[in-house]
């Protein structure tokens, strides 16, 4: 094989160059990973308490225990390393507020950062990797402060200043995000509404903002030289000075935004463009895009994990392509507007596959809204905010911002009055294969003389989809840590069993996981059953109500959730659903859990809540048919459940434990695991496999695991 490659390289020089580049890229990725993303220096045991020194970067919660992002300066029993200090998310108990820059020392239990992993949901683990957050943990006892880090004082004071001069405005989150790049002040609802309106890209510091700051710096320096009437030797290249000043302004802006990925990427692209321009090359050629992309990937090859990379470079490519062929700045106003509409239309359709792939839909109204919003934000609002921030220290111009705020608030509320179905079009069927095929067809359509061949990739994809076996029903056991949340779906309808836990009285998995999956597959929720009202099973109840699913409880809980569920049998999209509970005496809420059995012609699934061995024995004595193909282990695999009699009565082909990774309860219990192993029953766990999806066909079934199918090599355990 090696000889064949060398032979091909000897006769085909382009192949050898391509191969060399590929090998260099592999070494670059490995080197970058070992330097910036590997944490092999220190073996962390969560059972051990270590003295840790750390710097507070950001405090997420306002009261103790404080949930903070921290930079780990020193970890006991770990050698000091040359590479950049890793970050961690810590829960810290402290009498005093923890502020950004505080240097803290205390005993901490650390473990490798690991979060839940679900299909079609935000991947917080991957996001943590991109931010170099490698650990999480909690303090043991009190911690003490030993100083304050002043290193980022300029950036901190700048953000405090921007926050103070915009604090009495209705759209403070908008102004703060545009001037600092920090989107932490944007609420979840506002973020969702901006996405539906197609305006989220305006808040991410990108090419539009960087280009504008550069232009302001360039033309301001040019104007200052002109009005100062300085006599400058013609030997000096004034234009180079203007370019340098404009780029410096853009660099300062990116620094104040803390070098966020989108801003840094745009700055690199601007730098490549300017260098090529200064060298006398044609900057509107593909080389500027290729050089910028190469430089971005050399700086951080893991930026390939960021969807923004694909959106920004695809958008720039489309604009460059149109600039080359269609745009003419000498045209009149009407024709300029028509050309801008043409560009907007091209961007909409050019970015449509990416939008459908990453967001399961696209903003319909955004096509029109952006025609107004882009020039309004780029040419009016951002320059005005920069001017306001520069003079607010010297002059009282609050009334100016108040006027702008009133006008923008009115316009924003006007946009929110647009019906939701006009704002957002959901489409969930775009996978990676279809994404690739879409752009392949687009390239053939644009550059091939045989345009009709563009339909061939799509035709092959459609044929392949038609040949796939039909799924009769599907069971999703979501990864929610210590808790339970299950969805049974068939023929675009769904049953929900339990709603997972709620953390810190504000965070659950309803909108970010369950509703997202429901929307992605365009499902209609027919009924919801809650096994019992413990937080780990019903913590998401309030969010489920707010999402509009309050009426779905009537099927299994006609008398309310505080009463045991109805014992009943019903038909659901060709399946037989049995709902029942063990009628046992006592106040143990776990033993009053509602069970759900889903049966098709050949397969069945038994969901058991948190019943103990007592409830298991009661069900067996009553002669309840418990036999099932798939068993969801009672009480997450607790040793108080999964009795030998119960396992034999169910006689499952596989068992699934819904449990947390290195959780405080250490489920599934080793004795429970042993009991299933003695019967040669395969076991799977959400702690190890993440979201577990079971697809049932007519005569077979297939398992899919989020940790196997949604993870790259550097994310594997």
Image (spheres, grey):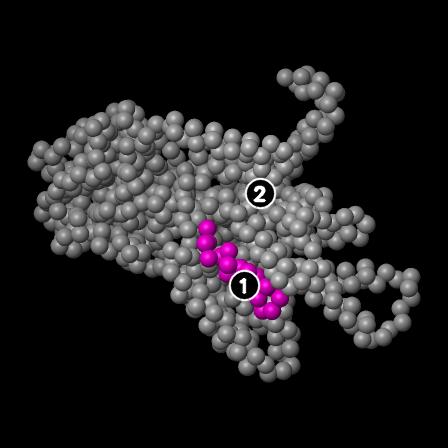
Tell me which numbered mark, 1 or 2, is placed earlier along the sequence.
2
Residue 370 on the magenta span: yes
Question: Quadrant of the image for the N terminus?
Answer: top right
Left or right: where 50 falls relative to 269: left
Left or right: where 110 falls relative to 249: left
Q: Position of residue 461 (x, y in %)?
A: 46, 31
Asked if one can make out residue 78 in the rendered structure from this viewpoint, the answer is no
Which residue was labeled with disc 1? 373
Q: Residue at x 62, y 62 (%)?
A: 334
Residue 591 on the magenta span: no
Question: Overall secondary structure of the magenta stretch?
Answer: helix
Q: Mark number for residue 466? A: none
In this view, the residue in front, 446 or 200, is 446
Asked if one can make out residue 500 in the rendered structure from this viewpoint, the answer is yes
Q: Position of residue 414 (x, y in %)?
A: 43, 68
As drawn, 488 above or below 162? above
Left or right: where 394 falls relative to 651: right
Q: Position of residue 605 (x, y in %)?
A: 23, 34
Q: Secondary structure at mark 1?
A: helix
As drawn, 301 above or below 18? below
Q: Residue at x 50, y 74 (%)?
A: 407
Task: Classify mark 1: residues with Cα within 10 Å, few (<14), some (14-19) or many (20+).
Answer: some
User: Alpha carbon of mark 1 to alpha carbon of mark 2: how far?
Assistant: 29 Å
Q: Secondary structure at mark 2?
A: helix
Q: Mark number for residue 304? A: 2
Left or right: where 574 falls relative to 105: left
In this view, the residue in front, 219 or 304, is 219
In this view, the residue in front, 431 or 665, is 431
Query: Which quarter of the figure has residue 2?
Result: top right
* Magenta span: 362-381
Q: Residue at x 32, y 30 (%)?
A: 470
């Amino acid at each position: 094989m090696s000889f064949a490659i060398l032979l091909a390289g000897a006769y085909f020089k382009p192949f050898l160059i391509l191969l060399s580049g590929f090998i260099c890229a592999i070494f670059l990725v490995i080197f970058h990973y070992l330097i910036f993303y590997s944490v092999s220096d220190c073996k962390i045991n969560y059972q051990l308490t270590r003295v840790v020194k750390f710097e507070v970067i950001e405090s997420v919660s306002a009261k103790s225990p404080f949930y903070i992002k921290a930079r780990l300066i020193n970890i006991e029993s770990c050698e000091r390393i040359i590479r950049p200090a890793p970050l961690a998310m810590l829960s810290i108990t402290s009498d005093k507020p923890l502020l950004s820059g505080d240097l803290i020392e205390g005993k901490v239990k650390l473990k490798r950062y690991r979060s839940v992993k679900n299909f079609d949901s935000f991947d917080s683990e991957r996001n943590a990797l991109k931010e170099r957050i490698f650990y999480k943990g909690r303090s043991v006892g009190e911690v003490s402060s030993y100083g304050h880090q002043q290193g980022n004082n300029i950036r901190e004071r700048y953000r405090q200043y921007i926050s103070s001069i915009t604090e009495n405005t209705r759209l403070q989150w908008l102004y703060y995000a545009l001037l600092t790049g920090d989107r932490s002040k944007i609420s979840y609802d506002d973020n969702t509404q901006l996405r539906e309106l197609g305006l989220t890209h305006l808040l991410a510091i990108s090419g539009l903002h960087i280009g504008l700051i550069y232009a302001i710096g360039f033309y301001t320096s040019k104007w200052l030289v002109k009005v100062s009437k300085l006599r400058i030797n013609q030997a000096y290249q004034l234009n180079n000075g203007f370019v340098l000043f404009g780029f410096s302004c853009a660099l300062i802006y990116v620094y104040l935004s803390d070098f966020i990925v989108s801003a840094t990427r745009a700055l690199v692209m601007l730098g490549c463009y300017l260098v090529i321009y200064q060298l006398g090359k044609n900057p509107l050629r593909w080389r500027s895009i290729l050089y910028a992309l190469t430089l971005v990937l050399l700086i951080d090859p893991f930026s390939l994990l960021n969807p923004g990379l694909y959106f920004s470079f695809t958008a720039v490519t489309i604009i460059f392509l149109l600039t080359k062929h269609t745009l003419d700045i000498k045209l009149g106003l009407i024709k300029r507007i028509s050309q801008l509409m043409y560009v907007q239309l091209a961007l909409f359709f050019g970015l449509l596959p990416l939008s459908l792939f990453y967001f399961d839909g696209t903003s319909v109204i955004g096509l029109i809204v952006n025609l107004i919003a882009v020039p309004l934000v780029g040419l009016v609002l951002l320059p005005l905010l920069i001017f306001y921030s520069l003079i607010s220290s010297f002059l009282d111009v609050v009334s100016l911002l108040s006027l702008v705020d009133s006008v923008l608030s009115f316009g924003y509320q006007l946009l929110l009055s647009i019906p939701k179905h006009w704002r957002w079009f959901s489409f969930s069927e775009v996978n990676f294969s279809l994404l690739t095929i879409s752009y392949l067809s687009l390239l053939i359509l644009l550059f091939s003389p045989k345009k009709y061949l563009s339909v061939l990739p799509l035709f092959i994809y459609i044929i392949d989809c038609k040949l796939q076996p039909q799924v009769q029903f599907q069971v999703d056991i979501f990864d929610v840590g210590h808790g339970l949340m299950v969805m049974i779906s068939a023929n675009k309808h769904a049953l929900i069993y339990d709603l997972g836990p709620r953390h810190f009285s504000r965070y659950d998995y309803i909108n970010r996981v369950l509703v997202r999956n429901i929307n992605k597959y365009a499902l209609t929720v027919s009924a919801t059953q809650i096994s019992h009202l413990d937080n780990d099973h019903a913590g998401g109840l309030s969010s489920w109500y707010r999402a509009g699913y309050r009426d779905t409880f009537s099927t299994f809980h006609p008398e309310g959730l505080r009463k045991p569920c109805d014992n009943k049998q019903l038909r659901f999209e060709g399946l037989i659903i049995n709902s029942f509970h063990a009628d046992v005496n006592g106040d143990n809420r776990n033993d009053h859990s509602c069970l759900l059995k889903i049966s098709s012609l050949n397969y069945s699934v038994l969901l058991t809540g948190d019943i103990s061995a007592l409830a298991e024995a009661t069900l067996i004595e009553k002669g309840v048919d418990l036999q099932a193909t798939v068993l969801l282990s009672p009480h997450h695999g607790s040793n108080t459940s999964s009795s030998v009699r119960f396992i034999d009565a169910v006689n499952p082909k596989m068992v699934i434990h819904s449990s947390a990774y290195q959780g405080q309860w250490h489920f599934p219990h080793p004795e429970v695991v042993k009991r299933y192993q003695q019967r040669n029953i395969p076991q799977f766990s959400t702690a190890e496999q993440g979201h577990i999806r079971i697809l049932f066909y007519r005569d077979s079934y297939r398992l899919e695991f989020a940790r196997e199918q949604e993870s790259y090599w550097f994310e594997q355990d």
